Image (cartoon, rainbow, N blue to C red):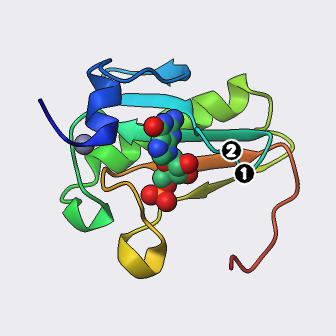
Amino acid sequence: MTACLFCRIVAKEIPAAIVGESEHALAFRDINPQAPVHVLVIPKRHLTSMNDITDGAEVAEISKLALQVARELGVAESGYRTVMNTGGDGGQTVHHLHMHVLGGRAMDWPPG
Ligand code: 5GP
Ligand code: ZN
């Protein structure tokens, strides 16, 4: 059994509110939402962070699913933010690559 939280969500060992799925990616609602729409999109294969990217196939895969989810949840036209935090200074707390999709309210810039 893996210790990685998001691998356990992929394996259905831990429940999540799944909002989208493709062959290689999974999208589910963040447990502590920071916006009316706050979804995490992950590759099913474990990669720790952007630092593990080689050919970028996983980033393409999660980007496509993120767009599909943004459309289905009704924020594609109003706008949304995609964020991938990497490492300590990036604010990453779960060490399985993920893209946040935040929408349903106006976002601030710059991020804190
Ligand atoms: P990070 O800080 O690594 O960029 O984002 C990790 C995100 O995972 C956080 O927004 C946090 O709320 C979310 N999260 C942590 N544990 C769980 C969980 O068990 N289920 C879900 N759905 N989200 C989680
Ligand atoms: Zn993992």
Asked if residue 20 can be seen in this view, the reply is: yes
Residue at image point 50% right, 32% down: 65
Q: Does label 2 point to a residue whose CB lies under 8 Å from ligand 1?
A: yes
Quadrant containing ligand 2 reads top left
- In the visual, does 52 lie left or right of 102? left
Residue at (32%, 40%) from the top-left corner? Answer: 5
Q: Mark 1 points at which residue?
A: 34
Q: Quadrant of the N terminus?
A: top left
CB of mark 1 within 8 Å of CB of mark 2?
yes
Quadrant hosting residue 71: top right
Image spot of residue 3 (x, y percent) = 19, 41
Q: Return the residue at label 2.
A: 33
Viewer-proximal residue, 13 or 46? 13
Whole-percent x, y for residue 75 in the image: 79, 37
| Helix, strand or loop status at disc 2 | loop
Q: Quadrant of the C terminus?
A: bottom right
Is the shortest distance between ligand 1 and the CB of mark 1 under 8 Å? Answer: yes
Dot 1 alpha-carbon crowd within 10 angstroms: few under 14, some 14 to 19, many 20 or more: few
Q: Report the amino acid beneath label 2.
A: Pro
Residue 68: x and y, percent?
59, 29
Q: Which residue is drawn at 73% across and 80% down?
A: 110
From the viewer's side, name the closer residue of 56 and 36.
Answer: 36
- Please determine whether, in this image, residue 100 is positioned above or below residue 65: below
Say if residue 64 shows up in the picture.
no
> Between residues 23 and 18, which one lies in front from this camera angle?
18
Disc 1/disc 2 C-alpha distance (Å)? 4 Å
